[in-house]
Image (spheres, helix red, strand yellow):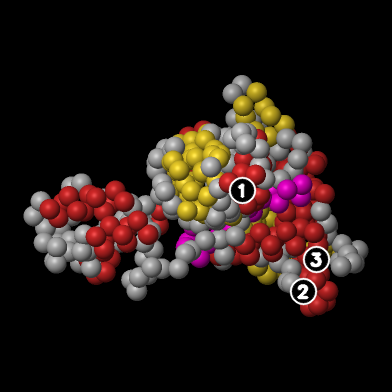
Amino acid sequence: MASVEMLMPKMGESIIEGTILTWLKKEGDSIEADESVLEVATDKVDTEVPATHGGILKKILAKEGDVVAVGTAIAIIEINAEASNDTPAAPATAKEVLVQAAPALTASLITAAEPEAPSHSDGRFYSPLVKSIAKEEGISTDELSRIPGSGAEGRVTKQDMLDYLAARSNGHSKNTGVTKTPPSISQPKAPASISGGDELIEMDRMRKMIASRMVESKRISAHVTSFVEADMTNIVLWRERNKEAYKAKYGEGITFTPFFIDAVAKAIRDFPMINISVEGDHILKKKDINIGMAVALPSGNLIVPVIKNADQLNIVGISKKVNDLANRARINKLTADDVTGGTYTVSNVGSFGNIMGTPIIAQPQVAILAIGAIVKKPAVVETPTGDVIAIRHKMFLSHTYDHRVVDGSLGGMFVRKVADYLEEFDLETAL
């Protein structure tokens, strides 16, 4: 039998480490190549990591909760003789295992990996190890469903079971279940009644992460916001005239978002000092224009997938990227690379009926644009025969920027330029 090291794989650009959330297999278990063996959390996503080889999980080198650098050995897999005949006798190098592991990763949103089928009628997932302990200790399905879980998405871990059994042996009845929570057991994730109709709801991991990042961003950056009103009439009319033909030609709809991203990308080319980050006492000017777009998830949380090299795409190309990323975001199919590398962010608060907002900068970027709702308004329009009042489609742009490195002149001129590109959209633009 030969052994190979399974390494912490690279899960996206700029990600250098991950936290071991849960081992889905235990030492001695048989595993297949590409079978998920553990869950890893990064600051971007939770990821199920597949086995690089089939065989026996001989030894687990990284415990749940450990923070492990990319390329570090996390387990040893014992492969069978037939498999070892096809591979070098020596353990695989870090580079070889990393290259094998990376393409097989299937990352989900921060909220967790792709949902697994529940093991019981209560809808919760229980690992084979937890079910085995429950069976050996005579814990009923009903009793098991009431054990608080400290794992990802509230899963019951081995330690939860051991804590529960220790508490039960100290006075809790086997048949009555959890009548009160011993100090050694994690608090339940289910809402707890406070008084009357009040509830105490624990944040999920994604919400905790968002909260931490927002507070940190306000601490780091000196936030300033400039506002501009843009006339969207040409774009509204073009979309109304062409949306059916567009859908027939490309098999999907076109929203206003691609027009916003196109205008932002063009304005960044005009004002490249918006496309920067701060590195200590230095400014890092980015070559690529990678625009993140905030997407609301069914859970109520937000995630920001990134359109890479947005300035190199036309409206159709951007629209396809927008639809693909938004659809995959809502069904937990984004990869780690989909949510990294952004250099500027757009948030469409108008989709919630808001006319403007003051968004918080996504670090380490230095600016973010909030797009308000498009509303009909009476406006003065200049014509060859004089000014007239006409109904126009208007929208506010709210540009928040980091005043440490972006002054009001640059921040204001940039958002004005975005509005200019939107207003100058050619009604004769072909599909």
Q: Residue at x 11, y 58 (%)?
A: 172
Q: CA distance from mark 2 to mark 1?
A: 45 Å
Residue 293 belongs to the span the image colors magenta: yes
Q: Give the residue number, with chain letter if any, for mark 2.
A: 251
> In the rendered structure, which disc, 3 or 2, sits on the residue that comes first in sequence?
3
Q: Secondary structure at mark 1?
A: helix
Q: Is residue 390 above or below residue 155?
A: below
Residue 130: name its quadrant: bottom left
Say what amino acid the circle numbered 2 marks.
Answer: Gly
Quarter of the rendering containing residue 129: bottom left
Please state which of the two labelled residues, at mark 3 or mark 2, is closer to the viewer: 2
Mark nearer the viewer, 2 or 1? 1
Residue 14 location (% of width, % of height): 62, 37
Q: With respect to residue 10, does 34 lie above or below?
A: below
Image quadrant occupied by the C terminus? bottom right
Q: Nearer the viewer, residue 157 or 410?
A: 157
Q: Secondary structure at mark 2?
A: loop
Q: Residue 18 or 219: which is nearer the viewer?
A: 18
Q: Magenta stretch: give its range.
A: 291-310
For disc 2, the neighbor class at 10 Å (few under 14, some 14 to 19, many from 20) is few
Q: Which numbered dot is residue 234? A: 3
Q: Disc 3 to disc 1, how far (Cα)?
A: 63 Å
Q: Which residue is mark 1?
A: 83
Q: Is residue 388 left or right of residue 174?
A: right
